[in-house]
Image: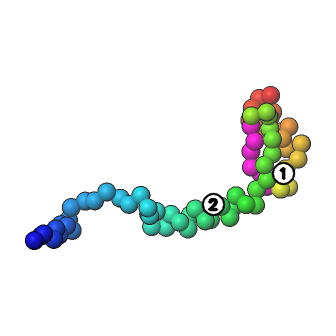
Amino acid sequence: MSVARIKDPMVERKPSVDENSKGLNEKIRKYYRHEESLMPLRISRNTVILVKPEKCNEEYAEKYRKEKLGI
C-alpha cells in the first residue's frame, strides 16, 4: 500500500518553466505590437536598427552613422 505524499504548502518550490509570471504575457504581446510598426534600416554591413516608417530613409541612416557611430 502506497502512502500519498502531501506537499507542505510552506515549502518553496521551483518556479514553473512552462508558465510566465503574472502580467508577462501581456507585456510580451504589447512589445510585439509595438515592434510590428517598426521598419528595419541598414546602418552598416553588420548593423540594422528598427525605426518608425517616416525615419526609414538614407538621410536618417547617415545622421545615425554620424551621431551614434562616429562614421
Which region is colored magenta?
47-52
Residue 26 versus residue 40 in the image, above or below = below
Q: In the drawing, does residue 24 fall left or right of residue 46?
A: left
What amino acid is at disc 2? Tyr
Residue 68 versus residue 16 in the image, above or below = above
Image coordinates of residue 62 in percent, x first then y, are 85, 37
Q: Please give the residue where the numbered disc 1 appears in the rendered image.
A: 55
Q: Quadrant of the N terminus?
A: bottom left
Between discs 1 and 2, the one toward the N terminus:
2
Contact check, label 1 and label 2, Cβ < 8 Å: no
Indicate the secondary structure of the residue bearing disc 1: helix
Residue visible at 79% across and 33% down in the picture = 45
| Residue 57 drawn in magenta | no
Q: Please give the residue where the numbered disc 2 appears in the rendered image.
A: 31
Q: Dot 1 surroundings within 10 Å: few (below 14), some, or many (20 or more)?
A: some
Residue visible at 35% across and 58% down in the picture = 15
Mark pair 1, 2: CA separation:
20 Å
